[in-house]
Image (cartoon, helix red, strand yellow):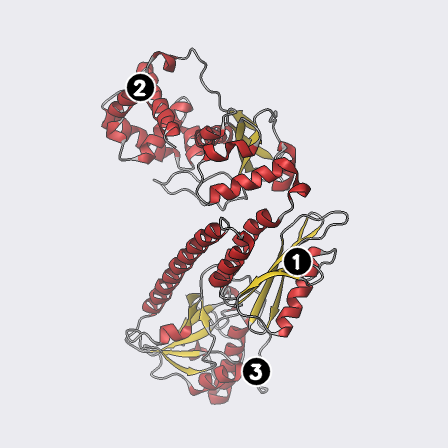
Amino acid sequence: MTSPPPTPPTSAPTTAPAPRATPPPSTPPVPLMELLARTDLGLRQIAGPREGVAIHWVHTSEMADPVPYLLGGEMLLTAGMHLAEVTGGAPALESYLDGYAARTVAAGAAALGFGIAPVHDTVPAALVAACDRHGLPLIEVPAGTPFTAVESAVWQAVTEARHRELTRLSEAQRALAAAAARPDPAAAVLRALARHVRGWTALLAPDGTEHGSSGPRPADAVRAAAGRLAQVVGGDGGGAGAREGAGGPSSATDALPGAQLSAYALTGRGPGRQALALVVAADPHDPPAHTIAGVAAVLLSLITGPAGDRGPAATGHASALVRLLVGARPAEVAPLLGAPLWTVVHAERRRETTGSAASLATALGTPLLAPEQETHPAATDAPPPGPALRALVPGDREITAQPGWTLGVSAPVPVEELPAADRHAATALRRALAQHAPLVRHRAPGLHGIASLVTADDARQHARALLAPLSDSPPLLDTLHNWLSLHGNWDRTAASLGIHRNTVRQRISRIATLLDTDLDDADVRMELWFALRALDRDAATHR
């Protein structure tokens, strides 16, 4: 049941309040004109602006005040049922609809869709006038088009736009990595970046000196704003849109008519040293351009950073990263990393901690820390999410528990074996989380372990034959691996995999059926564990 509308005002309608500030939607926008062009929907715009209107999602409401239920960017759909509760004749209806349009605009809605039938045969003329007055696009939804069809069309368009966006990002990353391997890498990266952001790119010193540019030359106002941003990230000043880093803002943004400017500090700062800046001018309605520019900033930081400022170790790390980006194998870059052995650390932030990733990197004694990843609850048959943080630490450094973090630590290994160490660190982290321990280390078997009594080929063939019924189901293999490593504990296995304990029981029961064996038998468990470890070693060898 809808709540009654507020008493209509007796005075003339007032100007709509300013739209409320809302966080930018995470979904790609759908141009309203794209929906209007679909003949199967039969939508018709009858009021409000027609250019530059973008829809992010759809919401249906028959409430008099939709504001509490809108996030911004919606097409709000209504059949006008709430209008029946307005009394007082045409003047009262006009005042009510004026307030309704004003509140919808204030909520940040992108457009209003009014359904013809079952309540109204036409869109009320007073609503058309109110939407024109407040600048709200008004769309007539014909009787033959259900609201669910409009919603489905929007989400289909969003999905297609997201696919195009991801494809574009992937192509841009490949192009930038290839450009970084060319003879004049900085200029090549600038050209590739300008092409993929469809704008202007430049390397600027804090005093405005240009060290290279590409793309259409911008207007003088844009060029002047770019120089100011370069000074912000290259000097000691700050400003709106600046992201603070060690020693000052590491990035800054500015918006001008028709252009969104972003600047990134490329070289470290300190006494007597200023940062060179990458400045990008792109379409303000092109969010992927910012992501692409961020990738280019990382590459240009490695290319333009003075080797002497970073020291030989950091220079070697940068060279190794660039070579990996352009297709080198780990064994080829190993000499550039300096340390012969490396430890992989997986880390999860505890709820109570406020420590930053940078502070963890400092405590571990390494700059080689991957950024935090967005994690989502694991689906029933999906692998567990990755760690919040992943780090590489020289193998001769002692790794201890860190306040506010849960750590999984691999054994020190040469660079060629880092993929296997990464899996070992992941397993150790899952065990640490399941056991509520601050740190768990993966322990490699000794030289005289049972695995040393069987050749690698024999162990691999035996494992593949024994586990053949599970070969087409990675979730079952992963569940068996975790369940055995945690001594058959249901709760810890569920916590390790991020699934419900009943799902673990169902999977183990299914595994026992497929293997036609008794998983309560200690001898069976030992043989299965030997087989799983053989597959682990085989996978590590062929990475």
Report which residue position mark 2 lands on: 459
Q: In the rendered view of the protein, which quadrant contains the C terminus? A: top left
Circle 1 sits in a helix, a strand or a loop, which is it? loop
**Can residue 16 be seen in this snapshot?**
yes
In the image, what residue type sits under mark 3? Pro
**Can residue 62 be seen in this snapshot?**
no
- Give me the C-alpha separation between circle 1 and circle 2: 57 Å
Mark whose residue sits in front, 2 or 3: 2
- Residue drawn at x 68%, y 58% is 205
Q: Which mark is residue 3?
A: none
Whichever of callouts 3 and 1 sits on the residue coming sooner in the sequence is 3
Left or right, 270 with respect to 365, comes to right
Q: Neighbour class for label 2 at 10 Å: few (<14), some, many (≥20)?
A: many
Circle 2 sits in a helix, a strand or a loop, which is it? helix
Report which residue position mark 1 lands on: 242
- Give me the C-alpha separation between circle 2 and circle 3: 83 Å
The residue at the far bottom in this view is 90
Left or right, 525 with respect to 350, comes to left
Circle 3 sits in a helix, a strand or a loop, which is it? loop
Whichever of callouts 1 and 2 sits on the residue coming sooner in the sequence is 1
Report which residue position mark 3 lands on: 9
The residue at the far right in this view is 271
